[in-house]
Image (cartoon, grey):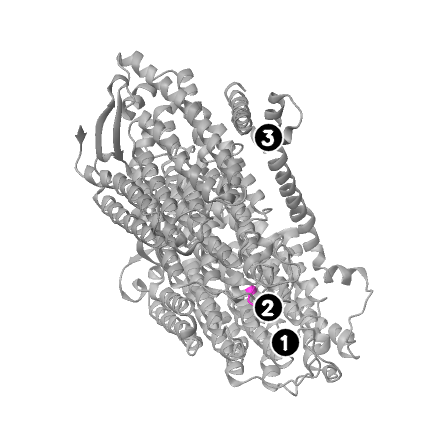
Amino acid sequence: MTATHLAAQQVAEVTEVSGGLAGSAWLLVLFPLAGAAVLLLGGKATNAWGHLLGTLTVVASFVYGLMLFFSSTGMAEGERVQNVSLFDWIPVEQLQVEFGLRIDPLSISFVLLITGVGALIHIYSIGYMADDPDRRRFFGYFNLFVAAMLILVLGNGFVTLYLGWEGVGLASYLLIGWYTNRPSAATAAKKAFLMNRVGDVGLALAIFIMFAELGTTQYTEVFAGIDQLSGATITALTLLLLLGACGKSGQFPLQAWLPDAMEGPTPVSALIHAATMVTAGVYLVARSNPIYMASEDGRLVVVIIGALTLLIGAIIGCAYDDIKKVLAYSTVSQIGYMMLAVGLGPFGFALGIMHLLTHGFFKAGLFLGAGSVMHAMNDEVDMRKYGGLAKIMPVTFATFGLGYLALIGIPPFSGFFSKDAIIEAAFGEEGWRGWVFGGAALIAAGLTAFYMTRLMLMTFFGKQRWKELKSEDGRDFHPHESPVVMTAPMVVLAIGSVAAGWFFASGDTLAEWLSPSLGTLAEAEHTVIPHSLVPWLTVALSLLGVLIAWLVVGRRDVPVVKPDPVSFPVRAARKDLYGNALNEALVAKPGTWLARALVYVDNKGVDGLVNGIAAALGGSSGRLRRMQTGFVRSYAASILGGTVLILVAFLAVRYA
Amino acid sequence: MTSSSGAALLVALLLIPLAGAIVVALLRDNDKLAKQTALGFALVELAVAVVAWIDYDPSAERFQQHFSLDWIPAFGVHIAFGVDGIALVMVAVTALLVPLVIGFGWAEKLPAQRTAGGFLSLILLQQAITIGVFAATDVFLFYVLFEIMLIPMYFLIGNYGGARRQYAAVKFFLYSFLGGLIMLASAIGAYSLASDELGKGTFDWATLVEVVSNAPLSNQIWIFLGFFLAFAVKAPLVPLHTWLPDAAAEAPIGVAVLLVGILDKVGTFGFLRYLLPMTPDAAVELAPLVLVMGVAGVLYGALLATMQRDMKRFIAYVSIAHFGFIAIGVFAFTAQAEVGAVTYMVNHSISTGMLILVIGMVIARGGSSLISDYGGLAKITPALAGVFLLAGLSTLSLPGTNSFISEFLVLIGAYGPEPVYTILATIGMVLAALYVLWLYQRIFHGPVRGSALVNVAGGPGTALAPEVGARKAIFDLNGREKLVLAPLVVLVIGLGFYPAPVIDVVTPSVDATLQSVGISDGGN
């Protein structure tokens, strides 16, 4: 099948709608947006009920999303992609940026994930944030996030996507820096926003190219015009969009901000930095599937980035003792799987989304479980101080355990279906690619089982190490099960972790439902290793990871202080495989030097040159004193200096 | 005398602040009455500006509400005013900011022996002249007002400013004045071209545009350069920018709003009104030069902003970066970039005006403009922190705020013809996030600290002092301050989601400007 043929097949029919359920889908965004406005502008007056309002708005959007979903299941396949025009946003001559919505299976899937998991995490936060005097503002930011995320996935063009894209970045920034007394939180928040902006430059440039080449930035028109573009342009688009995706989704080489983002409250990590926002990069690639279909090179780079990141995340995840950082690197790694999947094109778009949805359930559940543990342990995150919590926190243990089984891909839990499908598809690539990508995904599955089992053992099993320790603020540990308002959402997510995979995968339900958005899911005709062998290999490697973790961690007591010195691989993993050091050396340091040099130039150079010329014209000593009195001469010379500079430049332009 | 319908509106827009300046000057003995009177005139002016906006019909002829009377017949000089869409939005944003500036300064302490009447009289005079500069349709009149505009500003900085106000005022005056003189030479050159061509000299804008735009490139280039230097000082573009940090740092807050928010825009306004139509061949020929200066400004201003210690100097460098974007927009010659440049002028006035005002409110509380004297202010003044953050987000052009629309238009419009410059300028997007968040976090994040907020043993200037002494009595935004900021908050978000009212007014005038450069299909 040639690329162009595939691309043509991807451009789905779009039905224009106004009014009705889909036509009023802007209400989905309006509920949480209004909630955010009331909570952030209302001030202390809304303290008493702010958290309830904030939760209700998301529940309302979830209900609306469900109604959309059910009305859409009754439609014929060709009618399932609907465009809702709302108003002209940025209209300048040929550039007509419309503010509108695209209601299709892909966006509805995301709406249900965002508002469904979002509502559960809002409920959980009522309990988790109960002691925070600013809880109302927290819910305001949370609602702002949900609104922006919904704009991101519902927008009908790349500019509306960009609006949501940076909007979620803002909410993420505000929430990572939530604990204002921690300088590390401020640094992490700024780092997240900046690294995202680096990615955003890619997305912005892609939008500029679309307009320059096609005169439009709306999905429908861009996708319809792809066959007019040269191969180089399409590849450039795929790479620039991927840069944006890497920033938002914490993919190599922009992965360093995501683990630091764990400085935020744990519900934030669950909703924004695990289940929804960080998957926006995967959404972007999947949404742009007609563009990626037209560039094999572009897809290959996506696969490489995904494979690289899933390994990096899994390796580093093995080394951390901070429970949230382990889960964060696990997220980096799992999004790597999704990225790899969507890079496989028709063989993987739907699989990437399927893993995204199952991951949304079990990772959110895992984070909420971690939050529950931290809640019980005076906000301690060092797993070396945990131990033996299973008996004390049975609900947390059970729900966390189910999420764990889902993540490491034990059948029949949800992660098995979605991850195994991706590994199979990766082995379906031709020649060396199949071996390399499939192999990487398989090895990382083993690593995942290792670091997650290590986490389980250190947290819930073994000796209760906290009995002899105090938390940093000098208190004893008195772990206890969390209140129902927190455990109930964890139970619901655990059910999802168990059932979602089977539900999505049986009979390719999800893939077929998504086909109007993503095209038909294809299956490779032959894989480099036999098709039926892959699930066995995956499970075997996972069990091997579990076994090794038990041998290393479970058999003996965990030392309370982390062992040091350690071998080089462990040392490198603890240092995030030197990702931060690299950023520091390549970007931060040179940037600071450059800025310092420019300050010097600005003071001593541009202004000083001017003053120097003035002094030279005066031709005398005692220049400083004269400078004070010699304004006219000085600035005459200054203008002269600038003029000469510009004239020289002008001559260069003119006659060069 | 000739005039068109609606001319009375423009006459009123010119005369109300002028009359206000005189009346307020007479009320120097009574500070309170002077403030109330000044605010009254400023609000009436704003109301008239709104009416003028409604009266202006973008689909009709370009210049409206115009009138003309002879001034110096021997040289064909007229007192002629009229507005096109571009001038109209600049007049309107001027009328918007002045009452806010007056409201901001309501409780401000003036230097010894200075009266509110004197200060506000100069502010209103500044407003009248600035509106005149935007509305002038006679090149000589424009030049005269361009230079006279410096006088009230000179006194506003020199008499009411900070410690180094004299230095800053003279530096500002000489830079601008000398730039203006060079422009005068060019204006006379244009006049003599017209006189050769038509047998009779004139300074009428439309006639000069007609004559000079058909002159040979070599003539156009000299005329271009004269005007360009004056405008590039005003805007200011790197390397002619060094007066702005001093002027902005020493000017009182309200004056800084008008200086950075309005006066500087005369430079970029001049690019559009004079350079492109009058010397189109030279503009196209020399566009690479201006684009280089624009990109240099974007990166240079942004990098320097990250290193500033003083909030007001910070603003100056941020603005230098923003003027770089505007210059790129003007000289990319596409409808999108050009409309982007014009809306950038409006939006920069709104968002930078807002940022300066909130910085002024921080300084009013802590008594210092040094960033290192602050920390953790959000804990004491959450509302001020929120508005400050919004102003900052608009400054970094976050989508959903007004500034995004203009920066996006500039870049998307410039990318087609000038991809390399555009790619370089997008680096400015990252740097903007860096300097805005750095400033915000430094002042507002973390525990309450810094000598501006806490009584510490070392006294002011003791950077990073922990919370040891008693916290000073500092309060969140009061009713007056909320009233001053509310319109800006509404505009920042409102124009972010629905910019069509501004875009629709300026687009026809931008198209006319582009046609004069020989681009009639609106670019692309």
- State the quadrant of the C terminus of chain B: top left
Q: Evaluate whether residue A259 shows in this view.
A: no
Mark 3–mark 1 Cα distance, whole angstroms, equals 61 Å
Compared with A637, A201 (above or below) is below
Residue B262 drawn in magenta: no
Q: Residues within 10 Å of mark 1 (few under 14, many from 20)?
A: some
A168 sits to left or right of B24? right
Q: Amino acid at mark 3?
A: Met
Picture residue at 72% right of the left edge, 71% below the top:
A544
Mark 2–mark 3 Cα distance, whole angstroms, equals 44 Å
Q: Are marks 3 and 1 on the same chain?
A: yes
Q: Disc 2 marks which residue?
A: B470
x, y percentage for residue A21? 30, 67
A402 sits to left or right of B94? right
What is the quadrant of residue A69 in the picture?
A: bottom left
Q: Are marks 2 and 1 on the same chain?
A: no
Q: Which portion, as a residue range, is magenta?
A: A176-181
The numbered disc on residue A379 is 1
Q: Nearer the viewer, residue A464 or A74?
A: A464
Residue A180 drawn in magenta: yes
Q: Say whether disc 3 or disc 1 marks the residue closer to the N-terminus.
A: 1
Q: Amino acid at mark 2?
A: Ala
Q: Are marks 2 and 3 on the same chain?
A: no
x, y percentage for residue A638? 54, 28
Mark 2–mark 1 Cα distance, whole angstroms, equals 30 Å
Q: For numbered disc 1, what is the local secondary structure?
A: loop
Q: Nearer the viewer, residue B370 or A631?
A: A631
Q: Chain of mark 3?
A: A
Q: Chain of mark 2?
A: B
